[in-house]
Amino acid sequence: MTEAESQSNWDVIVLGAGAAGLMCAIEAGRRGRRVLVLDHAERPGKKILISGGGRCNFTNRHCKPENFLSTNPHFAKSALARYTPSNFLALVEKHGIAWHEKKLGQLFCDRSAQEILTMLLTEAAEAGVTIRCNMKVLGVRRTDAFEIDCETASFRSASLVVATGGLSIPKMGATSLGYDIAQQFGIGVIEPRPALVPLVFGREESDRFCDLSGVSTDVIASIGPRKFSERMLVTHRGMSGPAILQISSYWNGTGPVTLDMAPGQKLAAMAQERRDERTLLGKLRLVLPHRLLDRLLELDPPSGWSNQALEDWERRWHSWKIVPETTEGFAKAEVTAGGVDTAFLSAKTMESRVPGLFFIGEVVDVTGHLGGFNFQWAWASGAAAGRAV
C-alpha cells in the first residue's frame, strides 16, 4: 500500500471482501466510483472457496422471497427482483465457467469455487476497485466523512458499506464488527443466532439414537407450517442433513421438531395385508434403513393388530417428535440468522438511516434457505448498494 492510498479519500469504502462486498464494489466501480475494499483476512473470499463442498452453490434457479427468513419477510423482495439468478448466471457464463444444476434448482461450478472468486476479482479489477487484505478495523467515526482506522492506516470515504458477514464459522475469522458498527450508529440489531446448523439431542434421545451415527433417510422435517422434504442424517451428537439444517433456522430453542419418518408411505395398509410382525418388518425394510427401522420398532412397536391400533401407530411414525437440547452453534452453522434490523434500512438501496452508511449480505436480518439462496442474497443486496453509493 502506498502512502497516498493510506491517506487519500475514497468515494466508497466496503468493509468485507466476501460475496456481498465484492459484488457491491464491482457495481460501484462500474459507475466510476473510487472504491476501496478492506478485509481483515489474509486473502479475499475465503468463505466462497469452502462453499458447496468447494464447488460453490452460487445461486438457485427457483429463488423467491419465500426462501428467506427475516423479521420483515417483505424486505428482500426489492433487491431480489432487481438482481436475479439469471443476472448472476450471465456473469458466470461471460467468464466461461462450466456449471451444472443439481436437485431443487441448485447451481454449482463443475470444477472449483475458485473460479467464482477469480471472476469476482477480475470484474473488480476491471472496475478499478482497490482491495486491501490484512486490514483489521479498529474503529469507525463519522465527521464530514466516514473515517476508518485500521492497525496500519486510516481511510476516509463519503460512503461506507458494511459487508462483514455474521458470526458463523468463527475459525474463518467471523467477528461481530458489523453489528458493533450498527449499534454504534444507533441502528437496531436482531439477536444473531446460528442457522442452517445441526441439532443436538438431549441425554435421553442421545442414548436412543446416537449409536446409529451415519445412518440417513428421507424425511419431512417440520415446525408449524414450515416443512422440508430432504435427507436426515443421524450424527454422534444429534441430527444433521439437509432437512435438519433447513428446519433448524426455524427452531426457537425449546420446541419440538416433527419428523415424518416414512413420507408418502401407507404403513397401516402394509401391516393389514398380513397381520404379523415378520411381514410388516419385510415391508418396512423397503422404506427405512435397517438399523434405524429396528430401533424405531423397538422404541414404538404397534400396540396391536387391529385397524385402529395400526392407524394410531402410523400417525406416530408420520409425526415423530424430537425436542433437541441445543444446536451445534456458530462453529458449525452455515449462516447467521438475525442481524442488522431491516426497519433501519432502505429495501431498495440498503442504505441505513445514517446517510451514506449501508449494510449488505449476511450481516443483515435476511437469511436464506439451504441451496444457493444466501449467495443470491449476497449478490442482490450487494448490487443494490453498489448502484446507490
Image: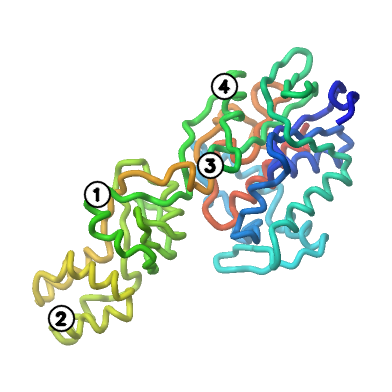
Find residue 345 and report its image quarter: top right
**Which residue in the protein does label 3 denote?**
168
Q: Residues within 10 Å of mark 4 (few under 14, many from 20)?
A: few
Q: Position of residue 96 (x, y in %)?
A: 81, 64
Q: Position of residue 88 (x, y in %)?
A: 73, 55
Which quarter of the image is occupied by the N terminus? top right
Where is 363 relative to 208, above or below? above
Residue type, numbered disc 1: Arg
Q: Are marks 2 and 4 in contact (CB under 8 Å)?
A: no
In front: label 2 or label 3: 3
Residue 34, compared with residue 275, is above or below; it is above
Mark 1 or 2: in front is 1
Do the residues under discs 1 and 2 have CB atoms within 8 angstroms? Answer: no
Q: Are marks 4 and 1 in contact (CB under 8 Å)?
A: no
Which residue type does callout 2 highlight?
Answer: Glu
Please tell me whether mark 4 sits on a helix, a strand or a loop: helix
Q: First in sequence, mark 2 or 4: give its number.
A: 4
> Badge 2 local density, few (<14 within 10 Å), some, or many (20+)?
few
C-alpha separation, residue under disc 2 versus residue under disc 4: 62 Å
In this view, the mark in front (3 or 1): 1
Q: Residue 203 got which mark?
A: 1
Residue in the foreground of this view, choosing between 207 and 373: 207
Q: Earlier in the sequence, mark 4 or mark 1?
A: 4
Look at mark 4 in the image and give the residue it sits on: 183
- Say if mark 2 contacts mark 3, CB within 8 Å: no
Residue 144, how many percent across, how many down? Answer: 78, 13
Q: CA distance from mark 4 to mark 1?
A: 38 Å
